[in-house]
Image: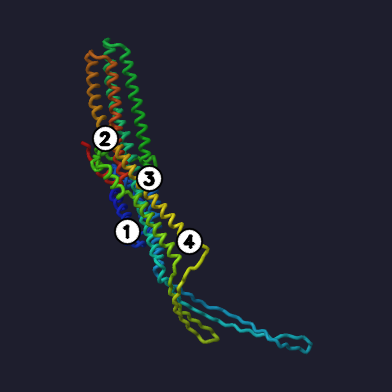
Amino acid sequence: MRGSFGFIIILLTTAAAPAAAADPRRLIAPPPAACAALPDRPLTLADLVDIALCANPATAVAYAASRSAAAEVGIARAADLPTVSATFGPTLDRTDYLRSQRFVTAGGASFGAQTHDTTVNGSASLALDWLIFDFGGRAARIDAARASQRAALATVADTAQSVALTTVNAYNSLQGYLASVEAAKATVAFNKSSFDLADAKRRAGVSTPADALQARTSLAQAELALAQAEGNARTAAGQLAVAIGQPPTTVLHLAPAPSLGSADVLSRDVDVLIADAERLRPDLAAARANRDAAVAQVRAARSDAKPSVSLAVQDQLGYADTSTDLNRASVGVTFSLPLFNGFDRTYRIAQARAEADRQAALLEQSRQQAGLDVYTQATALTTAIAVLTSARELINSATASADIAQGRFKAGVGTFTDLLNAQSALASARQQLVSADFGVRNAQATLARAVGQIGDAVAGMRRIP
């Protein structure tokens, strides 16, 4: 199966490349065969993105639209070539001749003389029509079609990046819940040891029954949190299965989550990231292509109001069973000058100009939104990294505090209330660390999507120092 990140890069390259150099007939082939079955091995994040890009219906919709746009280029290019048509076929003709003189029979009746003539005729003709010059109308329509094709290819790339981000977020959500389950199990184990300690001291008569009851309550709360975490993990597994185009009941065997990736590749100055987004984002490439198509349509509309020159060549062969066969050939040049058609062309030019202005405004709107997306997501990533740093410090101090509180209670120099507080703080710190860890992962992927580098973000995960 082809690498997902390479697939996205290919889509981006195709969207950015001039469509003029491509033969549209190569781009209207049917899609590849159906996706293969899930690999019989633990699935990595790259595997999941591959499967999603193949199986998600959104990518099929975008790909079909790109094939339609490629066909439109071929349709537009056909105007550069002459049209040739051939007609042939027999004709049966019957002619009745009515004479004016009448004849009278012996009985006194009269009748008119009538004759008829039946012939079989045939003809065959070959005609060629070729538009020679139209003040750039054909070229403008070809440019518009090629720009629309670039927009469609960019939309395929944009759809692929959206599918990839959805898969990454679903994967991170599941891995986060699985980590929460492990954190909850650790909390249950710690609370179980505290309960055993309190219960042993109660049986020895060195602590009150209230301590054991509080320990049992704390253990029950930890077990409840574990059950909730396991339920959330099952729900997240179903959501990930759907994200990659599988039924929600599909059992996915996942490889261990990679170590938390580094945000170094996205830690450049925000102005640099915004400039990268303007260069890499496929939705901006599509907006630019739509603007180019609209500008080309203005040229095409203007050419419709100008003269055109056409060449017509025809050769006709005729034959009949009562006359001599004939062959007639003709060559002509037609100069067509549009004079007046109720201001239709004037309004079409005005409409095309308005559409070009609209597409230019939409492009600027998209550029501004892209800049805001990058700024917002860069800020979110910076915040997430700061939260993760604090969460790591918190888990270290909470673990040490809980160990000390449990030791003091075991030695009889600390209260059980102190132990409860410490183990509650430790349970909270474990969950906060999990949330912060996968918060950074999601922030990385979302910023990469905003810049147009989602494939690099997933493939380039390295441990944050």
Mark 4: amino acid: Thr
Disc 4, disc 2: CB below 8 Å?
A: no
Q: Position of residue 370 (x, y in %)?
A: 34, 45
Q: Say which residue appears at 43% left-offset and 63% top-offset.
A: 302
First in sequence, mark 3 or 2: give its number: 3
Classify mark 4: helix, strand or loop: helix
Location of mark 3 (residue): 245
Location of mark 2 (residue): 385
- Asked if residue 458 lies left or right of residue 339, the reply is left
Closest to the camera, between mark 3 and mark 1, is 1
Mark 4 burial class by Cα count in 10 Å: few <14, some 14-19, many 20+:
some
Mark 3: amino acid: Gly
Residue 346 marker: 4
First in sequence, mark 1 or 2: give its number: 1
Q: Position of residue 93 (x, y in %)?
A: 58, 80
First in sequence, mark 4 or 1: give its number: 1
